[in-house]
Image (tube, grey):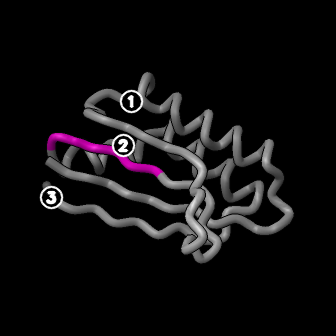
Amino acid sequence: MIEHIAILKFEESTSKDQKELIIHKLKNLRGQISNIIDFQVGFNFSDRSQGFEIGVTARFEDRKYLDEFILHPAHQEVVTYSKKVGLIETLTVDFLI
């Protein structure tokens, strides 16, 4: 089993509405991309966030399905939109569970 974690940081000019739309688009990926076992996304509320505002976790049976998720056009559309509205940094961790 693979656990995929991503945290997203945005420019100060990125609006709350734009970030909420990103969360909405990410949540919709579960219905668009097969082989996702579990998927969670939301706003970070920690005061230790170092400026990262959105957290994502996704679980897959194996690396092949993670790779398919990353390259899937629906996921790439969210990435493109996020960059367009001010995504400046993403930290990602993928590990076996």
- Name which of mark 2 and mark 3 comes first in the sequence: 2
- Name which of mark 2 and mark 1 comes first in the sequence: 1
What percent of the width, then of the height, locates residue 53?
A: 62, 60
Residue occupied by mark 1? 33
Quadrant in the picture for residue 9: bottom right
At x 31%, y 27%, the residue is 34
Q: Nearer the viewer, residue 49 or 69?
A: 49
Residue occupied by mark 3? 96
Find the residue positioned furthest to the front. Answer: 47
Quadrant in the picture for residue 48: bottom right
95 relative position to 33: left or right = left
Q: Which residues are magenta?
A: 56-61
Q: Nearer the viewer, mark 2 or mark 3?
A: 3
At x 64%, y 72%, the residue is 51
Mark 3, secondary structure of its residue:
strand
At x 59%, y 57%, the residue is 45
Mark 1, secondary structure of its residue:
loop
Q: Residues within 10 Å of mark 2 (few under 14, many from 20)?
A: many
User: Gap between marks 2 and 1, in whole Å?
Assistant: 7 Å
Q: Amino acid at mark 1?
A: Ile
Q: Amino acid at mark 2?
A: Phe
In the drawing, what numbered circle is on residue 59?
none
The prevailing secondary structure element of the residues shown in magenta is strand
45 relative position to 12: left or right = left
Contact? badges 2 and 1 (CB < 8 Å): yes
Q: Which part of the image, by quadrant, shows the C terminus?
A: bottom left
Q: Nearer the viewer, mark 1 or mark 3?
A: 3
Q: Is residue 7 magenta?
A: no
- Name which of mark 1 and mark 3 comes first in the sequence: 1
Q: Amino acid at mark 3?
A: Leu
Mark 2, secondary structure of its residue:
helix
Residue occupied by mark 2? 69
